[in-house]
Image (tube, rainbow, N blue to C red):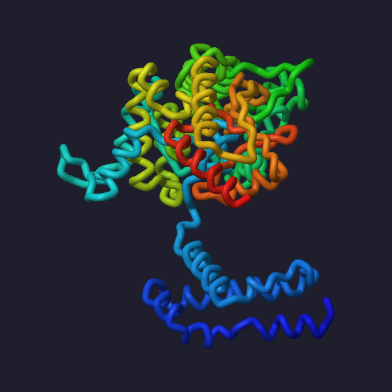
Amino acid sequence: MTSHLKKDLFRRIPKVDELLKEPSYRRLSRAYSRVHLVRAIREVLDGLREKINTLDPPNILAEWFTAEAIREEVETALKRQAAFHFRRVINATGVVIHTNLGRSLLAQEAIDHIIRVSKSYSNLEYDLDEGRRGIRYSHVQRLLCDLTGAEDALVVNNNAGAVLIALNSLAAGREVVVSRGEMVEIGGSFRIPDVMSWSGAILREIGTTNKTHLSDYERAIGEQTGLLLKVHTSNFRIVGFVEQVPGREIADLAHRSGLPAMEDLGSGNLIDFKTLNLPPEPTVQEALKQGMDVVTFSGDKLLGGPQAGIILGKKKFIGAIQRNPLNRALRIDKLTLAGLEATLKLYEDPRQAISRLPTLRMIAQSPDTLRRRAALLRRRLVRAGIQGFDFTVQSSSSQVGGGALPGIDMPTTCVAVTPRLMSETRLEKRLREASPPVIGRLEEGRVLLDLRTLLDEDFRDIVRIFTEIANEA
């Protein structure tokens, strides 16, 4: 683009003050604040300048510079600014506990309970029986103990916080013995050694990556030992020539040595996964029965509740953790507490938990159900007369996600979308830009919509969004 042509195009860009004086913009100023209006105008005008600087003359369209085009762009920018940044998306990836997409969906019972306690005052820290100040954890303490057999329970904001405060309370300044094969890194590059360091405990690694024996624990115990820690490798698997020490043996050794034993289950669960036709995953109940003094796990993964770090175990150890000043910084709020209580109450009947908790319900979907729902979605898309796409039903696999059951693929059914008028990457991007955004996965020139994580109420939006994309193509 010649310098002369560039200068001419730049001169055609109106000034902000000139636009603000026009009647159409004065009308916009009554619907939006002046700050938002000015910001939107500048965003659009900066976009025009960028196009001039980066595009060749054949790509510069005169219609971009018309008053009507600029006003429409400003209105679009204003609506985008007014919309919530944190919003609903449609998860078509097939990953049930998707860390980037909000992890577990809450059951309707949990949502209803959150609404009830958020729109009125509550007995958050008030003992109604005694008529005096109470303890917020009491609302879930008895439920957790009844469901798991634990002596006592405490809940903090997430499982990393649970591990941090437990180690700080029980082993600050002393050595914590843990197998090298259990040096877990969770999402966001948070690692067990780092959490341990911040807790004030001293890491004592034992064994090798693939093999650790009870004798390794025995040799590591000394005057500086504060705790034996077992970490469930819930987000990876080591296969082949491997050996890890069972929790029962670690707990027995700890108790013979006058030490506490702790297990971090990560994505802990209360349901035997064999009933869902999946490989067994250690349950919280099993860890406690094996003699662990403290067990920690997440509330928003396999449990299917809100984000929380749940700490269960012997009363004397939970009491020490609860008295730690860190507890104030890590405590859960009333909305989390309400969601967790309602979630836990569903576990009083395991069948109800599987049918009512979205996470467990998605995991438990039968192949026949997935095929039937995929056929239904495809039929709706075809009947809508959407042009430019081929919709087919395809078998595939999906995952639990959330650091649970790594390497385990669950058979699923997808609606595979093959675009004829655009690339699959362009379609994937356009779906992400939709309202609500649709997050699928790319595979061999197609966008797959996995029925395992699609809700029935998502179908109407998906049909509408594909119709809009087709009309724009």
The residue located at (54%, 12%) in the rendering is 277
The residue located at (63%, 30%) in the rendering is 416
The residue located at (59%, 29%) in the rendering is 415
Q: Position of residue 155 (x, y in %)?
A: 41, 38
Residue 60 lies in what quarter of the image? bottom right
Q: Is 65 in front, or is 433?
A: 65
Residue 351 lies in what quarter of the image? top left
Q: Position of residue 429 (x, y in %)?
A: 65, 48
Query: Is residue 10 rendered to the left or right of residue 248?
Result: right
Q: Is 286 in front, or is 91?
A: 91
Q: Is 39 in front, or is 296?
A: 39
Q: Is residue 20 visible?
A: yes
Q: Is 310 in front, or is 46?
A: 46
Q: Locate the N terminus and report the quarter of the image it occupies.
A: bottom right
Q: Position of residue 366 (x, y in %)?
A: 51, 16
The residue located at (36%, 29%) in the rendering is 344
Q: Position of residue 45 (x, y in %)?
A: 61, 76
- Residue 122's place in the image compared with 63, above or below, is above
Q: Is residue 227 visible?
A: no
Furthest residue in direction right, as rendered: 2
Residue 204 lies in what quarter of the image? top right
The total number of labels drawn is 0
- Residue 52's place in the image compared with 241, above or below, is below
